Each structure stands twice: as C-alpha cells, then as structure tokens.
Amino acid sequence: MTVDSYQLPITNYQLPITNYPLPITHYPLPITKLQI
C-alpha cells in the first residue's frame, strides 16, 4: 500500500526516467541480488 503514496511522485519523475532507460536496465541484476 505504500506504493500508492509514491504513485504521485513517480509521475513527476516519469520524464527524467525516460532519459535513463539504459541505466535502469543495468540495475535489474543487483536488485535481484538484494531480494535474495
């Protein structure tokens, strides 16, 4: 439910996120390691 709280701010970062599509793809592996 905490995700709902960040739903609004995420929309504000929607534009910058588009500028960082490549780096974001570089962070899927480390993220999975954190979950493990």
Image (cartoon, grey):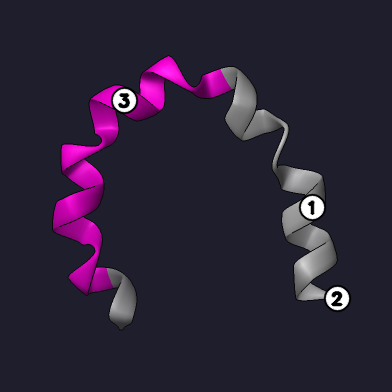
At 38% from the left and 20% from the top, the residue drawn is 18
Residue under label 1: 30
Around disc 2, counting alpha carbons within 10 Å, would you say few (fewer than 14), some (14 to 19), or many (20 or more)? Answer: few
- Provide the major secondary structure of the magenta segment: helix
Location of residue 25 (image quadrant): top right
Q: CA distance from mark 1 to mark 2?
A: 10 Å
| In this view, 11 is above or below 26 | below
For the residue labelled by badge 2, is the local secondary structure a helix, a strand or a loop?
loop
Side of 28 relative to 16 (left or right): right
Q: Badges 3 and 1: C-beta atoms under 8 Å apart?
A: no
| Magenta-colored span | 4-21
- As drawn, the label of residue 8 is none
| Front position in the image: 26 or 1 | 26
Around disc 3, counting alpha carbons within 10 Å, would you say few (fewer than 14), some (14 to 19), or many (20 or more)? Answer: few
Task: Measuring from the top left, give residue 1's x and y in whole percent.
Answer: 30, 83
Instruction: Let me know if residue 6 is in the magenta part.
Output: yes
Location of residue 8 (image quadrant): bottom left
At 41% from the left and 16% from the top, the residue drawn is 19
